[in-house]
Amino acid sequence: MERMQAFWCGLAVGLAIFFSPFAAGAEALQVTGSLWTPYMDDQLPNGGLATDLVRTALARAGYEVEPNIEGWSRAYQGTAVGVYDAVAAVWQNDQRSEDLLFSEPYLMNDIVLLARKGVLIDYANLSDLAGYRIGVVRGYAYEDAFDRSMNLNRVTNYYLIQNLLLLRKGKLEVIVGDKWSIFYQISRYMPDDLEEFRLLPKPLARRALRFGVSRQNPEAALIIDRFNQAIAGMKQDGSYEDIVRKHTEGLVVLPGKR
């Protein structure tokens, strides 16, 4: 009896997937996100690490993808109202959960602190950063307590590379950013300046990167479920690790130094 019930349940799910207009290829998913090298960048192979993982997973799940890179506000709001079907790379919070359904994490982002050579910061908590000029990027959410703190001297610029250049010149003592973004920028633009920087051993935060589908899409729950299954399958067969390696090998890696 239990086997028969399991059979009919499986058949029902299979039929739902088969007859879904997305699964049938009737319409491609409009997937958006903001420029975020090396995660999303149409100048990189397969659009960058996050784009490559998301596109591969969705293809396995039976969806075509039309990628669209926008400014973050435009990308998010467009997805919230249903202009786009999904955001490829997003961090979850309560407010965003009102607009999006989220996948399980498919990547982890280490938000790290990079100091100028000779600046001895023994970072254990936010109070240890007081008094230092800290480079941040406009519109970037790092960590709630850090973002809200009134006791930190944050210097805001538009791009990570600006903060790296200011750090090298000594106009900043420390900058905050995603680990792989920092490693990519140094590898591409400042490979001869490795000795000018030191990575603090303790990260500021660790954030779970997710795929988010607009609640305006009637197939949102199904898309998320199939995406999660596809990512799990990619991890099992090794293709997930192959994609990560392809986008990160060759980048300089700064070990955490005290």
Image (cartoon, helix red, strand yellow):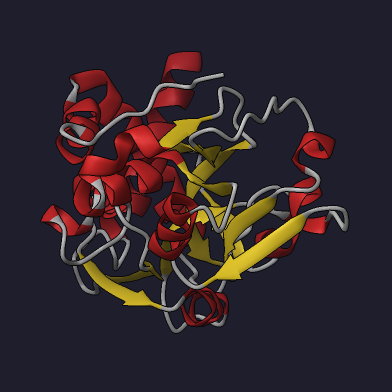
Relative to 15, say whether 8 is above or below. above
Relative vertical location of residue 46 with respect to residue 158 in this rendering, above or below: above
**106 or 167: nearer the eye?**
167
Q: Where is residue 110 in the image (x, y as percent from the top left)?
A: 51, 36
Give the x, y percent position of residue 201: 56, 22
Looking at the rendering, which quadrant does residue 21 occupy?
bottom left
Q: 145 or 82: which is nearer to us?
A: 145
In this rendering, the count of numbered labels is 0
Asked if one can make out residue 1 in the rendered structure from this viewpoint, the answer is no
Left or right: where 24 falls relative to 256: left
Residue 103 drawn at (x, y percent): 50, 46
Q: In this view, does 68 lie to the left or right of 88?
A: left
Q: Where is residue 135 in the image (x, y as percent from the top left)?
A: 58, 57
Residue drawn at 58 percent across, 40 percent down: 207
The quadrant in which the C terminus is found is: top right
| Residue at the image position 30 percent from the left and 51 percent from the top | 185
Query: Left or right: where does residue 125 sit relative to residue 17?
Result: right
> Dividing the picture into quarters, in which one does residue 22 lie?
bottom left
Residue at 57% in and 54% down: 172
Q: Can residue 125 be seen in this view?
A: yes
Of residue 174 and residue 73, the one placed in the foreground of this image is: 174
Check the image and name the residue furthest to the left: 45
Residue 136 against residue 209 in the figure, above or below: below
Q: In this view, does 153 lie above or below 204?
A: below
